[in-house]
Amino acid sequence: MINISISDEILAACPEFAFSAIQCKVKNTPYNAELWQEITDFSEKFAAKTPLSKINKLPNIIETREAYKKLGKDPNRYRPSAEALCRRIVRGIPLYQISTVVDLINLVSMKYGYSIGGFDADKIEGDLILGVGKTDEKFEAIGRGLLNIEGLPVYRDNIGGIGTPTSDEERTKISLETTNLLMLINGYSGKNGLAEVTEYAKKLTEKFAAP
């Protein structure tokens, strides 16, 4: 098991911060029709009732944005992933269909507003600590190229950064070959709600990605 700790830098800015971790064996697949139907159903209902202007005020999204501000990062330029996904739905832009494990993590994130890191645990070197991104720290964001993570919360292993609320890193990303999953659910709003979202994430993973 991977040990995960929180730096004093994060706790000073976000004393309520709490997280949950799920590490388990999985069998990833390119696509799952039943899961994608759940995503479609949620997306349609969410878009029908949620104005674009209200997304950045939703629970868990607003607290993640506040954490960015406290650390000196503009959450309108570097949106948390949950917010970016929800905005995409409301704007009528189709979600990317990536793989079953990634898609189910995105569903959890959209439904509950948490920014969730998903990693291939076998690619992580050593333990993890959540700190703050530094000037010129190299971070190859998935599908985005180099990302300026200065002022972003960032999980680091012995090699470097692997995950921020805006994007995860190419080096440890989930692929179809991933069999050892680490999912980190980040509660900048504190412990309230973490148990519920963690149970939901576990149920989805067991239902759609059990080995």
Image (cartoon, helix red, strand yellow):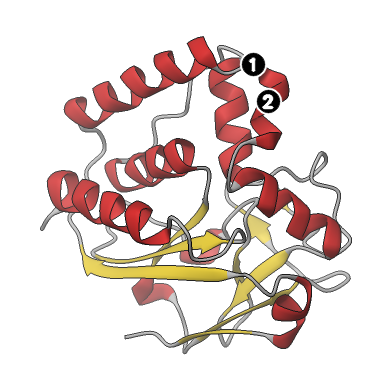
Name the amino acid, label 1. Pro
Residue that badge 2 annotates: 54
Residue that extends furthest to the front in the rendered view of this protein = 192
- At numbered mark 2, what does the secondary structure look like: helix, strand or loop? helix
Residue 3 in the figure: left or right of residue 207 = right
Quarter residue 42 falls in: top left
x then y, percent, for residue 9:
76, 81
Res. 144 in view: no
Residue under the point 57% across and 88% down: 158
Q: Is residue 53 visible?
A: yes
Residue 90 placement: quadrant: top right
Q: Residue at x 56, y 64 (%)?
A: 190
The reply to whether discs 1 and 2 touch (Cβ–Cβ < 8 Å) is yes
Pick whichever, 99 or 205, lies toward us. Answer: 205
Where residue 207 sits: x, y (%)? 13, 46
* Circle 1 residue: 51
Q: Is residue 44 above or below residue 172?
A: above
Number of marks in the image? 2
Q: Give, as a three-letter code, the residue at label 2.
A: Lys
Residue at 18%, 27% in the rendered image: 34
Give the structural element (helix, strand or loop) at label 1: loop
Q: Residue at x 47, y 89 (%)?
A: 126
Q: Residues within 10 Å of mark 2 (few under 14, many from 20)?
A: few
Horizontal arrangement in the rendering, residue 189 relative to residue 57 (left or right): left
